[in-house]
Amino acid sequence: MATKILEEFLEEVAPEEVGAEVALENPQQADYQLQKIKKINAEMDAVEDFARSQIEAIENWKDGRLKTLQGRYDWLAKPLEIYIRALHRKTEGKQKSLDLPTGKLKLRADQDQYEYDEETLFNWVVDNADYAEKYDLVRVKKFVDKKNIKDFVKTTGEIPEGVIITPAGEPRFYIEFKETKEDATEKDR
C-alpha cells in the first residue's frame, strides 16, 4: 500500500523536484518557482473544495438519517413515557422506575434552571454586602496582566521569575501571490 502511494507521488512530481533543493540563480527562475507553487496552491484549494463538498453531502445524509431515526425513537418512546407516568400517578409518586428485561423506565426530577443578569445581580450583591460576606457570594479572581508584564520587561529590561522569553529568531518566510486575470477566470468557473 505504502509503495503504491509512493509510486503515485513520484509519477506526479517531476524528476527535478525530487531530491536536492534547487539553487536559484536569477529572478526569472524564482518567478518560475512561484508560478509552480501557485499552481500547487490552486490544486490544494481544489482538493479542499472537493473535500468540503463531500463532507457537506455526508453531513446532510447523516442529518437526514438521524432525523428519521429520532422520529422512530420518539414514536416508540412516547407510549413508554405515558405508561411510567400513569404508574407514577397511580402509586401517588412512589414508583419512579420500572425494571424490565430489556432496560429501565425512569422518571427523574430536573434541577431548577438559573438565569443571571450579571449587572443587576452584581449591583444587588454590592447593595447587600452583609449577605455577600455571610454566604460567600463573591469570589475575587486574581490574575497576572501579561500585556503589562511585556511592557515591564521592555521598559526595565528585567525579566520576572516565572517568565521565559524565547527570542523571535529569523524573520518568517511566506509567499504572497498577485492575482492575475487567469486567476479571476478560474474562480468564476
Image: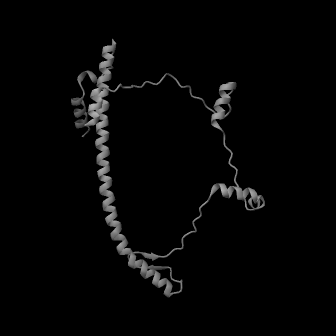
Where does residue 79 sit, x and y in percent of width and height? 38, 79
Where does residue 26 sit, x and y in percent of width and height? 33, 12
Query: On screen, 111 above or below 56?
Result: below
Where does the N terminus fall, quadrant-wise? top left
- For the point 30% across and 32% down, the residue is 42
Asked where in the image residue 130 lies, by quadrant, the reply is: bottom right
Number of numbered discs on residues: 0
Asked where in the image residue 60 lies, by quadrant, the reply is: bottom left
Q: Quick check: 14 left or right of 141?
A: left
- For the point 59% across and 61% down, the residue is 115
Task: Work out whether residue 137 can be spotted.
Answer: no
Q: Quick check: 121 left or right of 99?
A: right
Query: On screen, 32 above or below 118?
Result: above
Asked where in the image residue 173 lies, by quadrant, the reply is: top left
Where does the C terminus fall, quadrant-wise? top left
- Pick the residue in front: 142 or 169: 142
- For the point 29% across and 51% down, the residue is 57
- Pick the residue in front: 65 or 9: 65
Query: On screen, 65 above or below 25?
Result: below
